[in-house]
Amino acid sequence: MSNRILTQSDEEWEPSSDESSGSEYEPVESSGSLTQSLDEEVEVPDSTRRTRPRVARPQPPQRQARRAPRVPEVLANPDWQPPTSAAPVVPPFTAQSGVRVETAQIGSALVFFELFFTAELYDLVVAETNRYANQFITANPGSFYAQPFRWKPVQVSEFRTFLGLLLNMGLTKKHELRSYWSTNPIHHMPMFSAAMSRTRFETILRFLHFSDNSTSRPRGHPAFDRLHKIRPLIDHFNQKFADLYIPAQNICVDESLIHFTGRLGFKQYIPSKRARYGIKLYKLCERATGYTHKFRIYEGKDQTLEPVGCPDYMVSSGKIVWDLVSPLFGKGYHLCVDNFYTSVPQAFVPRTDWLLWHRGFPQRLLTTRLARGERAALCNQELLGVKWRQA
């Protein structure tokens, strides 16, 4: 077993909650209407008050409260003792970190790009795009795309051209899509019109798909997946990230935000992030390089996550860490997380070799006042809690 470390600065401690990071705001899907707000009862003076009949509003069915999983007694009430002078036993790092392909074979940026965008991925996108186009035309025989010669199946070579144009649009930004095919000398970009017509590009973009709609489950179904339309992409890149590079010993779990301002039920607002509005990702990264080893998209507060082997007393933030890190268990990795993801029970989960920075301090440390340059520590089995103050 390895020693786990809790650290706490005497100058920067702030209480926080296990249920949220404190820096995010989840927009409400329905905030009500003006009529609803005016219908609420408002206190007015007796002289001007009008009587009106009250309309009984149906009450939503009460949910049965779920019993919180019982935390083992040794974790719920840890026995903190003064630290000993014995040297900690840290398991050795046994993973073979580094690039998992021959670097000599990566001769250009295109070859490197195709390590992630493989032929299998191209085949998947082309097949699903053609499938969705056929499903739409069959269901809408009177639509514009159902007319003769308006739609023809996409080929892999054509999709590669489409993807190249799409990526180039991110490098050369214009105010609207049709500007890339404009003949105006100010906006003219001959590469676009030479590679593909604007009509064909818009048609492929209209039917671009990554999964089969017929296999999706409705909301409320046990197998409902909010990310069903992009689930094959998520699984593909998570697998490729893990296969192509093994992280070094020091890793971390934190949040990232993809800028997005459109309509989305689980869009997040995090003021501390540069994007502020967008889609939140939980990411497992290598500390030295920032390489993403695995990621998970936040799907809303109603998201259920039950990783294989995770203790049932773990809160949602602990389950996120377990889900991301479990493939690396038993290899001597040192994991750093912030106070949103950590707790004392999480430090004691079996089969992990984590070096954690923790919240969940013993009260004796929290109430200890330190002079500058001083530190205090308490030990509970292999868990070490440290409070310090800068000199």
Image (spheres, rainbow, N blue to C red):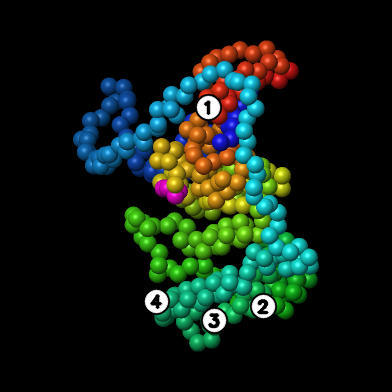
User: In the image, which disc is placed on residue 153?
Assistant: 3
Residue annotated with mark 2: 196
User: In the image, which disc is placed on residue 131?
Assistant: none
Q: Residue at x 58, y 13 (%)?
A: 368
> Which of disc 2 and disc 3 is earlier in sequence?
3
The span shown in magenta is: 304-308
Residue annotated with mark 1: 381
> Where is residue 282 shown, x and y percent of the image?
56, 46
Give the amino acid type for the residue marked by disc 2 in the picture: Met
> Is label 3 or label 2 in front?
3
Q: Secondary structure at mark 4?
A: helix
Residue annotated with mark 4: 139
Give the amino acid type for the residue marked by disc 3 in the picture: Pro
79 is higher (above) or lower (below) than 307: above
Spatial separation of the CA atoms under disc 4 and disc 1: 65 Å
Q: Secondary structure at mark 1?
A: loop
Q: Residue at x 57, y 48 (%)?
A: 328
179 is higher (above) or lower (below) than 143: above
